[in-house]
Amino acid sequence: TERLMERGLTSGRSDDNMDSIRKRFDTFISQSLPVLDHYKQKGNAHVVSSVPAPDAVYEEVQAVMAQNNVRPKPVADKVVFVLGGPGSGKGTQCAKIVEDYGFTHLSAGDLLREEVNSQSEVGQMCSTLMKEGQLVPMEVTIGLLKAAMEKATIKNFLIDGFPRALDQALAFEQQVTAADFVLYFDCPLKSMSARLLERGKTSGRSDDNMDSIRKRFDTFTSQSVPVLDHYQVLGNAHVVSSVPAPDAVYEEVQAVMAQNNVRPKPVADKVVFVL
């Protein structure tokens, strides 16, 4: 009654008044409660108290859904983690995959830089950590990725530069979804450094300098390589050397995609010859 009276202050509904509320409640008691009794006898009725706050009520609803084997809709049809050290060519290869296979490319680094550019409190904290070559809190990165995935219209995802540590991988699997497979671009420090320093001439990125590069590579080696080990144990990691020319690397990528039954997007949905 209190909720309906409160709603009536703004709803404009003619039945949100005390007299109508009493009549509606009497009707509910006399006609709808027998429906509940019927389904209780069949054993498929679940009574949830809606007195607590909405989020607490919804937790109980989720438990009921799980009990009845109803799963949340997937946030993605397919997820591919794209890993490799800084300057290993992840972005170049992702662009080719997007063009040929129609994936949505999400760069964890780009999402973080957008947050930094927003000058938010979180962005300022990320900026300091990124300059030091350190990882930002995984809750921030996972939150940005999940939000971007929910907004995307194409639900096959290339997630570039994430996870960078094993706890990130496990948390993403628990909070979002598991990766179908992992593409790992293997490249030595010397090659990556040369690429990043060349990029730094035009990129304007504060971390494209030798000091930051060394820190980033050290962080990558200590924290990201165990991620590769984890997925290799699971049997869904694919290591591709990114030392050769981009087109040669991409041939290897195409072989991995085929191995995982990922086909190039069709050139057309339908073709009609008019003669």
Image (cartoon, rainbow, N blue to C red):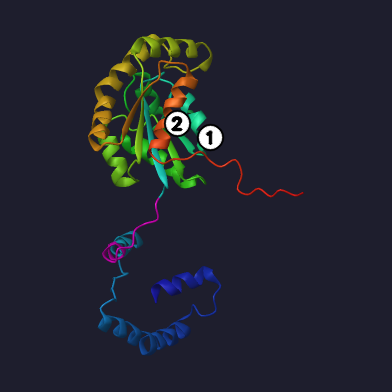
For the record, the magenta segment spans 63-74
Which one is nearer the viewer's eye here, 59 or 41? 41
Work out which quarter of the rendered image holds the N terminus and state it.
bottom left
Disc on res. 100: 1
**Mark 1 residue type:** Asp
Number of numbered callouts drawn: 2
Image coordinates of residue 190 in percent, x first then y, are 36, 9
Residue drawn at x 61%, y 44% is: 268
For disc 2, the neighbor class at 10 Å (few under 14, some 14 to 19, many from 20) is some
Residue occupying the far right of the picture? 275
Which one is nearer the viewer's eye here, 1 or 200? 200
Secondary structure under the numbered disc 1 in the rendered image = helix
**Mark 2 residue type:** Gln
Image coordinates of residue 154 in percent, x first then y, are 50, 45
Q: Magenta span has 229?
A: no
Residue occupying the far bottom of the picture? 30
Residue drawn at x 34%, y 14% is: 188
Q: Which residue is mark 2?
A: 254
Q: Relative to 44, say whether 177 is above or below.
A: above
Residue drawn at x 41%, y 88% is: 27
Q: Are marks 2 and 1 in contact (CB under 8 Å)?
A: yes
Q: What distance separates the C-alpha of mark 2 from that of mark 1?
A: 10 Å
Using the rendered view, name the quadrant where residue 149 is placed.
top left
